[in-house]
Amino acid sequence: MVKQKSYLQSSRKIVIKIGTNLLADKMTGVNTERLESIARSVAQLQSRGKQVALVSSGAIGAGVAALQLKTRPRTLAKKQAAAAIGQPLLMEAYEHAFRKHRCMIGQILLTKEDFIDRRRFVNARNTFAALFEQGVVPIVNENDTVAVEEIKLGDNDNLSAFVVNLIGADLLILLSDIDGLYSDDPARHSKATLIPVVEKITPQIERLARSSNPELSTGGMITKIQAAKRCVSSGAAMIIANGNNPEIIDDIVSGTYVGTIFLPDGRGLNRKKKWIGFVSHAEGVIVVDDGAKNALVVKKKSLLASGIMTVRGEFDKGDTVLVCDAAGNNIAKGVVRYSHGDLARIKGKKSHEAAKILGCKTCEEVIRRDDLAVIE
């Protein structure tokens, strides 16, 4: 507990995600009282030298209230229309709340493409850095008014984990209307207990998420575990806590909170490998034998053509691909130095054999160690 408290207190860069149920109601609109407590806590963190970004839900909810709709829209177009109306109302409420504490906010709307395209990713990262330099609190949301299903991240739990990787944050706080991860569904089992610490996300932990309240399973506990996996694998901690407590952010940073913390695995990947492993989109799959798996995971070596068993999908030189073992387990992602066509011809071959097959000088490594992130 002492170690966890020290980690939380020393976290310098923090992402806080605030769930829809905490921010907006379809009848009353934006919850200004909740925003007031969030603004106060964030201002206190800034005064202590911490950089904070907020990932905010609530735009569609605010739009539903403004339009006086009885139910949440179901079609994409109507959801986007509600978001277009609700987003400025939500930002106005944020601006008013933060102004009371002499804090300036900035709005950032992102889509999946801003993360998976390396150039756009770096540009977005630079924008965040410039805002932090000026003492501005970025308010982030997915650009719901233009994103179609094919390019949507889909939920703000995973969006917040992407932002953690984007800005190199130490800690992600997911504020919801639940206390954390339980040993069972507390609504159905009175003996269910809160799990305060998760040191490793095991299949058992993932089963607990799937067996929780169905209302929490879509955009709920399942997506929170997905976000946790992204965070801890890239060296950041994540906490699930109940945002109905107005002091919860202060309690978390002081280490006196009620909730569930997912501890980082300590890999300490550099920025490039974080993007490759946990942000970039894989265009294809390379299946490797046990020898190659051992070389990648244990010996920390590059991937050679001789250890490749199968090549799937269409990709070009310079694309990101997923590396799997013979059993189908994901073990790594990396930037490949061959197209799918050339790689299919030289898989399982030694370097000198590959050069003869392709009729030209070849790269010894299919994926260089510097361009590969182990995600097992």
Image (cartoon, rainbow, N blue to C red):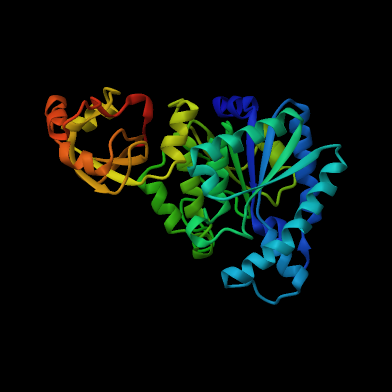
> Is residue 314 or residue 48 the one in the foreground?
314
**Would you say 55 lies left or right of 352 here?**
right
Q: Residue at x 36, y 34 (%)?
A: 335
Q: Residue at x 41, y 36 (%)?
A: 277
**Would you say 213 lies left or right of 290 here?**
right
Q: Is residue 255 visible?
A: no
> Is residue 344 or residue 312 the one in the foreground?
344
Using the image, determine if residue 154 lies above or below residue 10: below
Residue 253 lies in what quarter of the image?
top right
Q: Residue at x 42, y 45 (%)?
A: 281
Residue 26 lies in what quarter of the image?
bottom right
> Is residue 297 or residue 367 the one in the foreground?
367
Using the image, determine if residue 160 lies above or below residue 11: below
Which quarter of the figure is the C terminus placed in? top left
Q: Residue at x 55, y 25 (%)?
A: 3
Q: x%, y% of residue 363?
A: 25, 26
Which quarter of the figure is the N terminus placed in? top right
Q: x%, y% of residue 367?
A: 30, 30
Using the image, determine if residue 156 lies above or below residue 199: below
Outermost residue, bottom direction? Answer: 70
Q: x%, y% of residue 63?
A: 72, 66
